[in-house]
Image (spheres, rainbow, N blue to C red):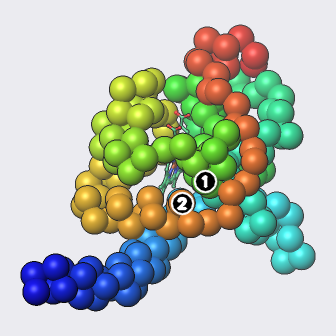
Amino acid sequence: MTSVRLIAAALALVPTLAVSDEAQIVRGQYLVTIAGCNDCHTPMVAGENGPERDMTRMLSGHPEQLVMPPLAVRPDSPWETVTSTTFTAWSGPWGVSFTANLTPDPDTGLGRWTLKNFKDTIRTGRHLGRGREILPPMPIPMYRHFTDEDLEAIFAYLQSIPAVKNRVPEPLPPPAALAAQ
Ligand code: HEC
C-alpha cells in the first residue's frame, strides 16, 4: 500500500517539476531583461535604424574577432571610462575588461558551470567564488543582492539559451592599458 502511494506521489510530481522548471526559466528571462544583462553581454551592431543588439549572438560577450586597438585617451582628459562600438569592451582605471560569454557553450561559456559556481561568482564578486576579482562595469555591488530564487532563475534561463562558441579575451591590467596609450 505504502509503495503504491509513493509511486503515485512520484508520478504526480513529474508534471509539476516540468511546469515549475518552465516557470523558472520564464522568470529568469524576465530578470535578465530588466537587469540589463544584454546591455553589456550582447554585442551591438549597426542596424537599419541605428545601433541594435545582435540577438543572433545573444549574451555571448565580447566578440573574439574584434581585437581592440590601443586606446587613444590622454591621461589628463576628463574622459575616464570608454566602451567599444559593440558595448562589450570597457576601458577605465581598472584596465580593460571584456564582457563574458554567458551562453551554455561548454568551452567558452558557462556550460560547465554549476548553479553554485554562478551564485558564488555573483555573491563574492570573484570568478567561481575564489578566482580573480570580477572587474567593472559588471554591477556586482547591486547584483549580489539578488535573492537565491532570483539567481537560480537567472542561471536556469542562461543554461536554456542557444550556446554560442566565442572565446572572450582575458582583461588587460591598468599598466598594459596605460602603456598602450
Ligand atoms: C554594465 C555592464 C554589465 C552588465 C549590465 C552586466 N555585466 Fe556581467 N560582466 C560585465 C563585464 C565587463 C564582465 C567581465 C569582467 C571581468 O573580466 O572581470 C562581466 C562578467 C560577468 C560574469 C563573470 C564570468 C566569469 O567567468 O567569471 C558573469 C557570471 C556575469 N557577468 C553575469 C551577468 C549577468 C547575469 C548580468 C545581468 C543580471 C550581467 N552580467 C550584467 C559587464 C556587465
Determine crowd level at label 2: few under 14, some 14-19, many 20+ residues with C-alpha closer than 10 A.
Answer: many
Give the x, y percent position of residue 130. Answer: 36, 26
Amino acid marked by disc 1? Pro
Left or right relative to 59: residue 37 = left
User: Circles 1 and 2: CB distance less than 8 Å?
Assistant: yes
Question: Which residue is at 82% across, 61% downward?
Answer: 45
Of residues 93 and 73, which is closer to you in this image?
Answer: 93
Of residues 117 and 143, which is closer to you in this image?
Answer: 117
Determine crowd level at label 1: few under 14, some 14-19, many 20+ residues with C-alpha closer than 10 A.
Answer: many
Relative to 71, say whether 23 is above or below: below
Marks 1 and 2, Cα distance to the nearest angstrom?
Answer: 5 Å
Give the x, y percent position of residue 87. Answer: 68, 51
Instruction: Tell me the element at label 2.
Output: helix
Amino acid marked by disc 2? Gln
Q: Which residue is mark 1?
A: 104
Asked whether residue 9 appears in the rendered view, the answer is no
In the rendered image, the residue lying farthest to the right is 48
Instruction: Tell me the element at label 1.
Output: loop
Q: Which residue is mark 2?
A: 159
Relative to 116, say whether 72 is above or below: above
